[in-house]
Image: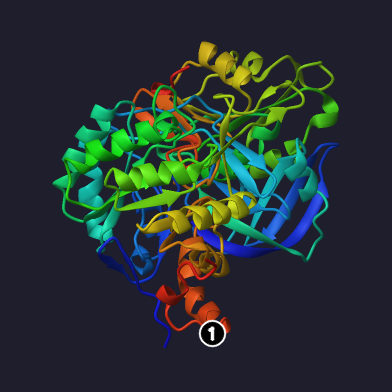
Amino acid sequence: MVNTKVNLCGITLDNPVIPASGTFGFGQEFHELYDINCLGSFSFKGTTLEPRFGNPTPRIAECPSGMLNAVGLQNPGVDHVITHELPELRKIFHKPVMANISGFAVEEYVQVCEKLDREDGIGWLEVNISCPNVHGGGMSFGTDPKAAAEVTGAVRAVTKKPIIIKLSPNVTDIVSIAKACEDAGADGVSLINTLMGMRLNLRTRKPIIANVTGGYSGPAVFPVAVRMVYQVSKAVSIPVVGMGGVSTAKDVLEMMMAGATAVEVGAANLVDPFASKNIVEDLPKVMQEYGIESLTDIIGAAH
Amino acid sequence: MKQQDCVILENKPLTELVWQMKLQADTSAITAPGQFVNLKLEGLYLRRPISICDWDEESLTIIYKVVGEGTQQMTTLQQGSKIDTLIGLGNGYDTSKSGSDPVLLGGGVGVPPMYGLAKKLLGEGKSVKVILGFNTKEEIFYEEQFKALGAEVFVTTADGSYGTKGFVTDVLKTLSYSYFFTCGPMPMFRAIEAVAQTSGQYSFEERMGCGFGACMGCTCKTKYGNKRICKDGPVLEREEVVW
């Protein structure tokens, strides 16, 4: 018997597979298809203080081995999430869930974290400082070490739950930002968010996406993600959650060998709604294939 | 929703750019006409959503227009090969509101879902009028199939090369009806909205990420709040549409 358990910031996961925020809603659409309790956890839809419609459509474009999205943090707002989404989520998912939160000012991050800190069933707060599709917030906190540290410190002060800061790849030096988060009290970092990209429609000669730019995700970004997880996990002593193009159980192993303690699965869920479930089921097989008895043994094996 | 590797039973052109594909499929997840399938194609990342034209217990028919890389590739798929398909997506048309003599309006590649809808409404004992709108005579498909169902069929062409010259609304203005159902391009919807005398249902199109409600890629605003075209739609009621 192989052991797929990992420990992420003090909470034991049955396996390291975590559907990524924005690709799994609040779990309902997938619960209709399979028992989502097979997952390690999942990161729910990015939540802000106020309800947001998000960006105009089109929000999606096809890319080589991936996709662009510019949803723009559409969500019903934290109060609605607490009164409507979380009670429904608790009925279908019986493990600690990862709460993904976002904001446009430090104070907003603080207020959302304060509200969610009081909620049962939330294991970790994944603080998104890297959304490339909103203006005047989002990624601007994740591209500067000082701003990243400021958000981290502010949310640290209002919650005892583990804080995982979600980092942007759209930076010159992701390591310095990860370190700044660690120094400011983060319990972990997750990376990578999407890579900023753009596609044009040759007939209209204009961008396909109404927001002009979008975030690139899918298998195409996997090597970039592996490289950044490797660099960051070498430089920090807090756990790293790896993501970016993960589509198979082998990808999970590679991400963990690069230094990830747990692994998020994003775009793959949209193309194959059973992707995360299949990865969980395939893990023991591929572990055996590569002579791995316990997944914790391979974390950072490449270092 | 069901996921299945469906065997292609038939894949043939109906006009220069419009093709018909029949798939062997477990159709138990299809609950209403106007729903769609989402197809995984070789070498393309996102699935391609295509409306369901007709179905029985073990097969379904889709009709698609070649407009880009995905639909171009679909024309090359051979009978007997398999295609990874998500079946029974979206809400579909609600026939309970149709009254006794609804009118169905299909424009171009918006015609296919009208077929399954006409079949259902006729099966419910309703009198069905269908207005099919095309640009030219060469683009017309499925006129005979709608007639064979027992619907009263009107065809319009923009250039006047067949049927009534003009648009579906030129015929709609001359008819009496209890309700309308439609699928087609936005300009046609706006024209219908301007002249329709009754309540009705529109089926909308949008670029989708997943097709099953997870990614929020296709959200639109309605008078009843935000709706995902793929999951809460594609069919919206006239009263809720924000134009």
Give the secondary structure at mark 1. Answer: loop
Kindly identify which residue carries mark 1: A291
Residue A81 pos. (x, y %): 25, 40
Q: Position of residue B217 (x, y in %)?
A: 50, 37
A123 left or right of B179 in image? left
| Rendering coords of residue B56 (x, y %) | 59, 58
| Residue placed most toward the observer, B154 or A85 | A85
In depth, the one of A36 and B36 nearer the eye is: A36
Q: Does B140 sit above or below residue A63?
A: above
Name the chain letter of the residue that bears numbered label 1: A
Taking the spot 16% from the left edge, 49% from the top edge, the residue there is A119
Q: Is residue A32 visible?
A: no
Is A198 in front, or is A270?
A: A198
Q: Is residue A78 above or below residue A280?
A: above
Q: Nearer the viewer, residue A154 or B36?
A: A154
Position of residue A123 relative to residue A99, above or below, is: below
- Quadrant in which residue B57 is drawn: bottom right
